[in-house]
């Protein structure tokens, strides 16, 4: 009888050890699956990172700038082979306007190049830009401010240098353009 009880206890012990070992294996597999799922979600989040940008547009009747905020996924095809600055500048040039706010950049203006050196963005525009500006000093400043503020609101951009057909002009309609511009806050309505 003692032998029988001993054998029975050994069998129960073996079954319980075997069952516990299987559960640990299942638990490990479950943990690995959860880790893989979390890792895949993190990869998808990295891919779906959003880039925020702001376009500064001019009010059609008043000498003020108004901002329009946008976002684009960092992996969007529109950004392929472009810097963020180049993409945003093209968006500003192509913008039709929003409500009472219009695009101040003269029609026909082309972006010839855009380069970033340290915290200064150099924007090289076609001659249509300077030729299409009204002869009004304030309108010219407002148009330049639209571009400058659009560029300098982005991280790591502090100044914008303008070029026309590869040359830095001394003046455009009485506005000194031979030095880089910083963010211009003079064109916002009082709140």
Image (cartoon, helix red, strand yellow):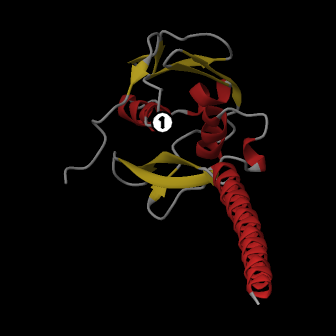
Find numbered disc 1 in the image and state the secondary structure of the residue it sits on. loop
Q: Is residue 11 above or below residue 187?
A: below
Give the percent coordinates (x, y) of residue 48.
66, 54
Nearest the eye: 5 or 168: 5
Q: In this view, does 20 lie above or below 170?
A: below
Give the percent coordinates (x, y) of residue 2.
74, 85
Question: Which image quadrant for residue 63?
Answer: top left
Q: In this view, does 74 lie above or below 5?
A: above
Q: In this view, does 9 lie to the left or right of 121?
A: right
Question: Mark 1: few, some, or many residues within 10 Å (few <14, many ≥20)?
Answer: some
Q: Residue at x 66, y 46 (%)?
A: 74
Nearest the eye: 7 or 20: 7
Q: Is residue 111 above or below residue 26?
A: above
Q: In this view, does 178 lie to the left or right of 80?
A: left
Give the percent coordinates (x, y) of residue 50.
59, 51
Number of marks: 1
Instruction: State which quarter of the image contains the N terminus.
Output: bottom right
- Furthest residue in direction left, as rendered: 191
- Furthest residue in direction bottom, as rendered: 1
Give the percent coordinates (x, y) of residue 127.
66, 24
Q: Residue at x 19, y 54 (%)?
A: 191
Q: Mark 1 points at which residue?
A: 154
Q: Is residue 82 left or right of residue 163?
A: right
Q: Residue at x 75, y 70 (%)?
A: 26
Q: Residue at x 68, y 63 (%)?
A: 31
- Furthest residue in direction front, as rendered: 1
């Amino acid at each position: 009888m003692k032998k029988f009880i001993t054998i029975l206890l050994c069998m129960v012990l073996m079954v319980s050890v075997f069952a516990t070992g299987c559960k640990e294996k299942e638990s490990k597999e479950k943990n690995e699956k959860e880790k893989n799922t979390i890792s895949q979600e993190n990869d998808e989040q990295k891919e779906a990172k959003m880039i925020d940008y702001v376009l500064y547009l001019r009010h059609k009747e008043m000498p003020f700038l108004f901002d329009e905020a946008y976002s684009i996924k960092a992996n969007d095809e529109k950004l392929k082979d472009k810097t963020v600055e180049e993409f945003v500048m093209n968006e500003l040039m192509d913008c039709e306007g929003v409500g009472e706010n219009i695009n101040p950049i003269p029609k026909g203006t082309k972006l010839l190049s855009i380069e970033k050196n340290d915290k200064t963005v150099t924007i090289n525009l076609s001659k249509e830009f300077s030729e299409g500006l009204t002869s009004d000093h304030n309108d010219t400043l407002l148009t330049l401010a639209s571009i400058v503020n659009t560029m300098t609101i982005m991280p790591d951009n502090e100044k914008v240098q303008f070029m026309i057909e590869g040359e830095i002009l001394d003046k455009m309609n009485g506005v000194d353009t031979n030095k880089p511009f910083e963010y211009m806050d003079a064109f916002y309505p009082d709140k």
